[in-house]
Amino acid sequence: MLLIPPTNDASNRTGGPGFFAQVHVEPQAVVMLMVLFLPKGKLHLSLDRTEWDFGSQQWNVLMLTAYSEGVGLPLWWSLLDNNSGNSNTQDRTKLLTQVVTLLGSERIGSLCADREFIGKDWYKWL
């Protein structure tokens, strides 16, 4: 498929959102592409929750980043449906299960997370 950009200014401003509204990219494909840019060997994963405010819109994001040889790359994220709240065990296990399914557990060297990520069920799952 050949994509030809629109030629007038109005089309240029609306072409990107229109294109992305019609194209669906599987998150798994994006992760596999990003992993190609990381060095071979064990990945060190960092799990964190962050909050982004865009005007009156608030996004609560659970983010997993992979590090190897000084290079960090966001691998997977999910939007949490609570406002400014912590993630729960179900949120974390769902995210990590998807990544482990794609990468394989043998590729993971370590997981680092801060004090927010606690709980008996969470530790048992790990």
Image (spheres, rainbow, N blue to C red):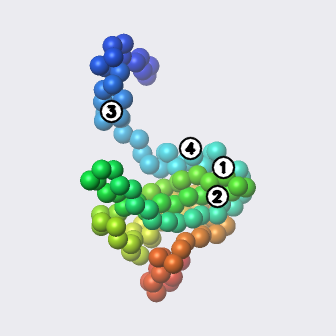
The amino acid pointed to by label 4 is: Leu
> Is there CB contact under 8 Å for labels 1 and 3?
no
Which residue position is annotated with label 2? 67
Q: Earlier in the sequence, mark 4 or mark 2?
A: 4
For the residue pair 33 and 59, the one nearer the viewer reads as 59
Which residue position is annotated with label 3? 17
Q: Residue at x 40, y 18 (%)?
A: 5
Which residue position is annotated with label 4? 33
* Distance (Cα) linking label 4 and label 2: 15 Å
Q: Earlier in the sequence, mark 4 or mark 3?
A: 3
Q: Is residue 42 above or below residue 19?
A: below
Residue 30, given in percent of the width and then of the height, sits at 50, 45
For the residue pair 73 and 102, the one nearer the viewer reads as 73
Give the number of the mark in front: 4 or 3: 3
Farthest-out residue, top: 7
* Distance (Cα) linking label 1 and label 2: 8 Å
Q: Is residue 85 left or right of residue 74?
A: left
The tag on residue 38 is 1
* Distance (Cα) linking label 2 and label 3: 31 Å
The amino acid pointed to by label 1 is: Leu
- Regarding mark 3 in the picture, which secondary structure is present there? helix
Residue 84, given in percent of the width and then of the height, sits at 34, 67
Residue 16, given in percent of the width and then of the height, sits at 36, 29
The amino acid pointed to by label 3 is: Pro
Give the number of the mark in front: 1 or 3: 3
Q: Residues within 10 Å of mark 4 (few under 14, many from 20)?
A: few
